Image: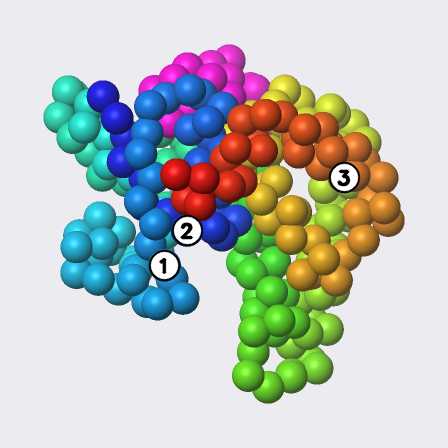
Amino acid sequence: MTIELWTWGTPNGRKVSIMLEETGLPYSAHPVDISKDEQHAPAFLRLSPNNRIPAIVDPDGPDGEPIAIFESGAILIYLANKAGRFFPTEERARYQTLQWLMWQMGGVGPMFGQAHHFRRFAKEKVPYAIDRYTSEARRLYGVLDRRLGEAEYMAGEYSIADIATFPWCARHEWQGVDLDEFPEVRRWYDAIAARPAVERGMQVPFLN
């Protein structure tokens, strides 16, 4: 059965399209143009109570009944469990993956998103906010660089933690960051960017 994906070309949306491409689960993408406030449509609200993309509907849920899921991290965990990939079953490795996924959800996403807003989209320049979020973005890149100096991927093996973080790092220029300053991040980034499934997932929903 085909999973329905409601998404747009943002880092959070691309997490899920990359995951779907990596797992090979059949899916159909439906664009939700956030530049036109389509995420506020009542039909989408029924899928995503927070009016944010992405959201999925799997007609073949855990009990054989359809299930709708919002929040990109929750969607990644669901798809990983469904496909049996990119989320280890061994308990220690599973928590290693979860902690780095939560690091992305609680740190990278919100802080990089604020850097994007104040550096590129705010109607007025707010130097304090620009400095604050640019500095925090650089700090987080430092955390990632140190971790990747210890392991090939964030949780050791390629996992949903990497899939969640990569699309945000793909906009490093928006955050005022040169990846060459973080050589381990650059190595990791280039390796993930070269994966065919990632290349395809980064083009959704415009690929469909």
Residue 183 drawn at (x, y percent): 85, 39
For residue 52, which numbered disc appears in the image?
Answer: none
186 sits to left or right of 207: right
Q: Is residue 68 magenta?
A: no
Q: Secondary structure at mark 1?
A: loop
The residue positioned 70% from the left and 53% from the top of the image is 172
State yes or no: discs 2 and 1 in contact (Cβ < 8 Å). Answer: yes
* CA distance separating discs 3 and 2: 25 Å
Task: Identify which amino acid the numbered label 3 is placed on.
Answer: Val
Task: Identify which amino acid the numbered label 1 is placed on.
Answer: Asp
Q: Nearer the viewer, mark 3 or mark 2?
A: 2
Residue 204 drawn at (x, y percent): 45, 41
Q: Which residues are magenta?
A: 79-96
> Can residue 95 be spotted in the picture?
no
Q: Is residue 87 magenta?
A: yes
For residue 33, which numbered disc appears in the image?
Answer: 1
Residue 41 drawn at (x, y percent): 21, 62
For residue 8, which numbered disc appears in the image?
Answer: 2
Q: Rate crowding at label 3 as few (under 14), some (14 to 19) or many (20 or more) other CA atoms within 10 Å.
A: many
